[in-house]
Amino acid sequence: MFPVIGDYPINEITKENIRFLLERPLKRKSKIMANRLLSYLKQFFGYAEDEELIMQNPTHRLTKERVGGREPPRKRYLDEKELRLLAGLLPNAGLREEYQAILWLLLATGCRVNEVLRARWEHINLQKRLFYIPADHAKNNEAHEIYLSDFALRQLEVLKETRTTKWLVPNRTSDGPISRQALAKQITDRQEEPSDKNRASNPQALVLPKGR
């Protein structure tokens, strides 16, 4: 990646540059690698967009289906041992408290990432212990309600303490929710293999035995 676009100022990288970069693994018939590369690029530029380092995201509207094609659904899940390990790792991982809460909320509810990240406080009824997911937030385009356990309610109380906008977790400019890419980057930056090239202060803080 860096040999191709490493010398470009970040705000001058275009969609054409990204497509050229993605063509390299595709020419080797490595469609999965192309999709992985796209995921990393979307995380990176999503974070840059949230930080207002760029005005336009060159990965916008680029999807895995249009690059390497749809992949079989992943079967990765956290078993009880990994959940206990994660509970011990998170407090010392350097993640903001609201990011930790949103991760636990995802695990507690089984909701899709975008269903939680796009949620607004108007969708939460703490008294009735319900999380309402509008149809336009759901993957199947059907509105539904999620019952909130005691554990899930505790995570929402953490988020409520820092509430400043209508979003559960706002982005840096508070004009929208935090992006999936920005949240993912906070996690993957802490799940790197040991390397002298790691720039994060704690790149192995959230490494789990079975990987990401």
Image (cartoon, helix red, strand yellow):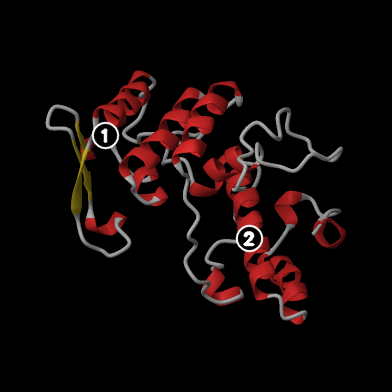
Q: Residue at x 63, y 60 (%)?
A: 58
Query: Number of marks in the image?
Result: 2
Q: Residue at x 23, y 35 (%)?
A: 148
Can residue 55 be seen here? The reply is no
Which is more N-terminal, label 1 or label 2?
2
Above or below, 34 relative to 88: below
Above or below, 3 relative to 185: below
SS class of the residue under badge 1? Answer: helix
Mark in front: 2 vs 1:
1
Q: Tell me the crowding category of disc 2: few under 14, some 14 to 19, or many 20 or more residues within 10 angstroms, Cα based.
A: many
What amino acid type should be assigned to the residue bearing mark 1? Trp
What amino acid type should be assigned to the residue bearing mark 2? Pro
Image position of 169 (left or right of 202):
left
Gap between marks 2 and 1 measured at Cα = 31 Å
Q: Quadrant of the N terminus?
A: bottom right
Q: Position of residue 179 (x, y in %)?
A: 49, 46
Name the disc covering residue 193, or none: none
Closest to the observer: 178 or 207?
A: 207
Name the residue beneath numbered marker 1. Answer: 121
Quadrant in the picture for residue 163 = top left
Image position of 31 (left or right of 146):
right
Q: Position of residue 62 (x, y in %)?
A: 56, 67
Above or below, 45 relative to 167: below
Q: Position of residue 162 (x, y in %)?
A: 39, 21
Above or below, 70 relative to 100: below
Q: Position of residue 182 (x, y in %)?
A: 55, 43
Q: Residue at x 86, y 53 (%)?
A: 7
Name the residue beneath numbered marker 2. Answer: 58
Q: Tell me the crowding category of disc 1: few under 14, some 14 to 19, or many 20 or more residues within 10 angstroms, Cα based.
A: some
